[in-house]
Amino acid sequence: MSIPHGFVIALDRHTRVVDGGRSLLGGFPTRLLRLAPRARPLLSDRTLRVTDRASAVLADRLLEFGIANPVIEALPPCPDPRYTVVIPVRDRARQLDRLLAAIGTEHQVIVVDDASHRPEEVAAVAAKHGARLVALLTNLGPAGARNAGLGQVTTPYVVFADSDVVLTPDTIRTLLKHFADPRVAMVVPRIVGLPTDAPANWIGRYEEVRSSLDLGRNPAAVLPGTPVSWASTACVVARVDALKDGFDETMRVGEDVDLCWRLIENGWRVRYEPAVEAAHEHRLRLDDWFLRKAVYGTGAGPLARRHPDFIAPAVFAPWSAVLMVALLAQRRWSVPIAGAVLGVTAVRIARKLDGTGHPYRLALRLTSNGAASALSQTSALLTRHWWPLTALGCTLSGRVRRAAAVAALTDVALEYRTDKAALGPVRYGVARRLDDLAYGGGVWLSAVKERSTKALHPCIVRPRRRVSSGRSRP
């Protein structure tokens, strides 16, 4: 099966057209894709429309490398838009009523009551909206409840929606367009905060810009080791025949990430589409919010056991790892060594880009971007994933104290300017550090429980995976 005629893709915002249109530079990991002569005219104004086999092959490769994304507005409607909505719920009758009212009655809806304490309230709401009710006698958790609903689905597509989200039929119809690509198994929208009449407190304002479920404003392929490395099933549209065994019912946390990564391992594509949104009822009480962040972290251990190659909290090239070690050492030789590493790396990358017209200019840009990414990831390690070690080190070493202070302050300063949160920098900084403490604490708890530190290990990739070249032959 190939991408059908009429499918439209556009180059990702990070992709650069170089060498007079003869090559593309982008993707994750960054690669140089040299276009064959007959492939070059297929791209017009950074856009490609599939009209024949050659353009279908090129589009498939650009999507596979993360160099381009589908243009959702230009895609045709799904030819078979039949879907069933599966809603796992435990109590939360009020939220369920709100969601069912927003969905409407055009398509089948299955409400899975995961052993509610007050099942009669859930049953009444389901009956009110004409939804089918599947009542579980024992609490199976989100994975088991979704599987119970999935087993009743007879349509080609299934929509999983948690009871604390709100979505519309238009959201689902738009996401269904992605399934024109026969390799797409799952598509997720952007998860944003649910507007409320009452003014949000400082935690609520922080969640509006730093929610764990919000994957950003840019479309992307979901791939481990990239900016969008996982997808939540708080709201998701999936191809039923791709799900097979569904969710892992032994997992109470991280079951959605596990499913996403299993699909990718099996050769399917998972897409993130921020052009449409689903509103999520964020937690606003400090204790409830902090606990939920910690619970998210506890999923790292089980995920590390199932997907050891995907779980790394940071991904470095060898040169960027050396660069970070040199800077963290804070010795007299640190700056000269860091400068030498950057210089040698830029030269090596320029040689791989030979023939592009301005190889050294591009190499300097790529090296700078790589160094910035390494600094950001190192800051996250110190303040989030490794914070217990950082705290211990601060009691013993002035160098560790300086590194931790720079990491924490730089992290807040850069993200505060980007996020444009509707709260002051001090409260934003406090919320950011509490977020890291909770999540990192959960990761360490899971590591102790699993008796493995795999979820805490950064990944060092070989140079050929960072800047590679290929040739397009559609």
Image (spheres, helix red, strand yellow):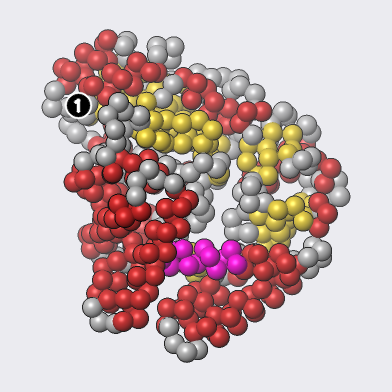
Determine the image quadrant of residue 94: top left
Determine the image quadrant of residue 10: top right
Query: Looking at this rendering, what residue extends furthest in the front direction?
Result: 424
Quarter of the figure with the N terminus: top right
> In the figure, is residue 303 to the left or right of 444?
right
User: Magenta stretch?
Assistant: 368-379
> In the figure, is residue 366 to the left or right of 371?
right
In this rendered view, identify the residue nearer to me: 222 or 306: 222
Secondary structure under the numbered disc 1 in the rendered image: loop
Q: Is residue 166 above or below residue 306?
A: above
Tell me the chief SS of the magenta region. helix
Query: Looking at this rendering, what residue extends furthest in the bottom direction?
Result: 332
Residue ID at (72%, 28%): 6
Residue 228 appears in view: yes
Q: Is residue 473 above or below residue 270?
A: below
In this rendered view, identify the residue nearer to me: 251 or 457: 457
Quarter of the figure with the C terminus: top right
Location of residue 171 in the rendering, given as x and y in whole percent from the top left corner: 48, 25
Q: Which residue is mark 1?
A: 91
Mark 1 residue type: Asp
> In the figure, is residue 360 to the left or right of 240?
right
Residue ID at (48%, 44%): 216
Location of residue 453 in the rendering, given as x and y in whole percent from the top left corner: 31, 66
Residue ID at (25%, 52%): 294
Location of residue 438 in the rendering, given as x and y in whole percent from the top left corner: 26, 55
Query: Looking at this rendering, what residue extends furthest in the right direction?
Result: 37
In this rendered view, identify the residue nearer to me: 362 or 451: 362
